Amino acid sequence: MQYLFSSASRYLCSSSSSLTIRRFFTPLKTMDSAEELLRKTLAEKLTLIESQGNVVRDLKSSSATDKSALDEAIKTLDSLKLEKSSIEQQLLASSDGTSVGGVNKEVFRKNLVNTLERRLFYIPSFKIYSGVAGLYDYGPPGCAVKSNVLAFWRQHFVLEENMLEVDCPCVTPEVVLKASGHVEKFTDLMVKDEKTGTCYRADHLLKDFCKEKLEKDLSLSIEKVQELKHDLAMLDDFSPEQLGSKIKEYGIVAPDTKNPLSDPYPFNLMFQTSIGPSGTIPGYMRPETAQGIFVNFKDLYYYNGSKLPFAAAQIGQAFRNEISPRQGLLRVREFTLAEIEHFVDPEDKSHPKYGEVVDLEFLMFPRDEQMTGKDAVKLRLGDAVSKGTVNNETLGYFIGRVYLFLTRLGISKERLRFRQHLANEMAHYAADCWDAEIECSYGWIECVGIADRSAYDLRAHSEKSGTPLVAHEKFAVPKEVEKLVITPVKKELGLAFKGNQKKIVEALEAMDEKEAMEVKAALESKGEVEFQVCTLEKAVTIKSNMVSISKEIKKEHQRVFTPSVIEPSFGIGRIIYCLFEHSFYTRPSKAGDEQLNVFSFPPVVAPIKCTVFPLVQNPEYEAVAKQISKSLTAAGISHRIDITGTSIGKRYARTDELGVPFAITVDTTTTVTIRERDSKDQIRVEIEKVASVVQDVTDGVRTWADIQWEYPSHSSMSTADE
């Protein structure tokens, strides 16, 4: 299962207040007609081959066989085998994809990761000590890319939306995470190698087994294919017993030793610590950044002039003690989150800037399409909101803003989709939730969660801390309102339930109007009712003498309510890795004797914006290069100056591999050429204008096409070595 990076990654079941990580859900997708036809044809062909093989064997064993008849039978068998091979190739091609841009996924990924590590974008942490799984260091270009992504995130969201930014501690007291539910149920199911004790994620093992069978075993029957796909789809819903049963049914063993595995059991993913030298204050390294915002709501609301809506944002590190980290930056034990909590009146979820995104069109994957086996479809955002596919304007607005953020970073529009959570993924309190998923060589990876979490989080912390985390709407004229009044009879509840009295009182008082009136009707008609208490994880019998439920008319001067929360949550490491994949390509050298690696980063995220190269080692050219370097530094443009005698073509190739958008070549003392990385087109610019030209393009004021229109193109022999 894939973990998410935020509180959008968890859900509270409707029958329990305990929290668990929301597993990555593979939508149940029926076998398409093309795949079904190919599998049927392959099965028929295998039957024919077996039958024809018997014919050949019988002819060979018979002394009276005519040689021409045997030759013809063998020819028919060979023809059937060729047809089988052709069908297998078609079936492989129609499976879940084995290539990226026509290149084998494994080959593509190996080349990419080799380049990233060789050029120090990132490397395994503590490498000289053999490293630790799930921990990585960002090197110089990786740090620059990450810094640029976060700077653009801050510009795109925090500044443009006037958000309140906070920075909270990574160490969190246990009481906070008890209130949120993390201490009790922030778990994954784990199995152990019964002989070595090595731990594995149980659902990972089942998922890998099913995917490998589907991709590599072409002889599977249609019924078996459907069963495996169903297992993949139901991973999120399997209990420990069901998951263990499947592992035994398929004979899944420890990958490294082939030893038998234990039954699955829950493992809490938080890193535990203690606060203070006495060790009496338990704490945890935070598994998300959201809780710091929720517990500060009261002060942030006051800071905002006690007005809604408003949003708070936080960028910071989060920690999860992953059982079996894998897939590089996609599943790690320490990672960077960028989270937004947008607080809004639950009775008015409109957004004043919704009109700015209403006409955006992009791939969306509503739950209806997922359940019927269809693919994501391109929808207009305004239509999705007006038809109720997206629950409300504010949620739709943030979906649109996330789309713009990711595509402006360099994520391909065709490999980005927004997938709606299915019913079995949704928290009982959530109004709606969508994941921004990016396709890479590992498949569709969830990188951003955008959820309408209703008022759950603030209510949970209000109840636990005793501090009301509420907002107020003052009335110009007092209003007479009908109020629901729930009065638990604590004496009777105490006699009946003793130590559980408090939890039952809290559950009764937390009922919404609909539930309360249903309980009232049942008590009046039957004298008792079965009442589900989430915190006890069971139902109890409430009798009519234990609670009073009524409606009263009261005059109020203000409305007091708990705000709803719209939460976009960004896994920065995942976004960066997908950006690496989407930006990476190879092209032949000028001589055609090698493939050169290129990262096509947009200037906004490129680790270095430009390079400065004297064409040859010449004191005058080197002086000009240093002059240009000073002007670039003054303009705040990151750059690298290279005055080595290496050929200009090799210098271009080196910086292309770092994703540098522009190369400035000093070949006169008055003008220089500026080369664009992807097209390799060059223009000639006066030395005094170089910094302003580069700054305009990197800041997005003008495009490269605008610059080319203004300045003359330049063909130079200096590129002969490319």
Image: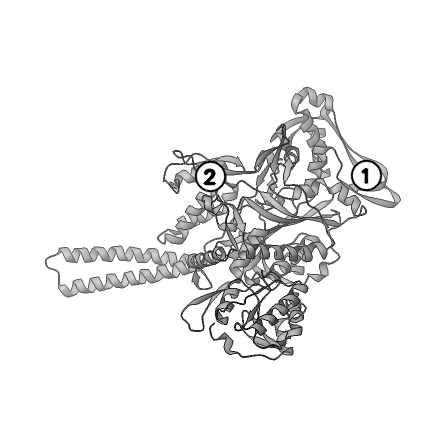
For label 2, the SS is helix
Q: Nearer the viewer, residue 641 or 313?
A: 641
Query: According to the image, label 2 marks what residue?
Result: 243
The image quarter in which residue 558 lies: top right
237 is higher (above) or lower (below) than 414: above
Tell me which amino acid carries mark 1: Glu
706 is higher (above) or lower (below) than 531: below
Query: According to the image, label 1 marks what residue?
Result: 482
Residues at circles 2 and 1 in contact by the CB criterion of under 8 Å: no
Front disc: 2 or 1: 2
- Counting residues from the start of the chain, the first of labels 2 and 1 encountered is 2
For label 1, the SS is strand
The image quarter in which residue 548 lies: top right
Question: Where does the image place residue 399, in percent across and percent down from the top left?
Answer: 65, 55
Extreme-top residue of the structure: 495
Extreme-left residue of the structure: 63
Question: Where does the image place residue 685, in percent across and percent down from the top left?
Answer: 62, 76
Tell me which amino acid carries mark 2: Leu
Extreme-right residue of the structure: 477
The image quarter in which residue 698 lies: bottom right
Q: Is residue 437 visible?
A: no
Q: Nearer the viewer, residue 636 or 579?
A: 636
564 is higher (above) or lower (below) than 606: above
Give the label on residue 119, or none. none
Q: CA distance from mark 2 to mark 1?
A: 49 Å
Badge 2: residue crowd in 10 Å (few <14, some 14–19, many ≥20): many
Question: Where does the image place residue 594, in percent across and percent down from the top left?
Answer: 42, 68
Q: Is residue 298 visible?
A: yes
Badge 1: residue crowd in 10 Å (few <14, some 14–19, many ≥20): few
User: On the rendered structure, is 163 left or right of 479?
Assistant: left
Question: Where does the image place residue 263, in percent across and percent down from the top left?
Answer: 44, 34
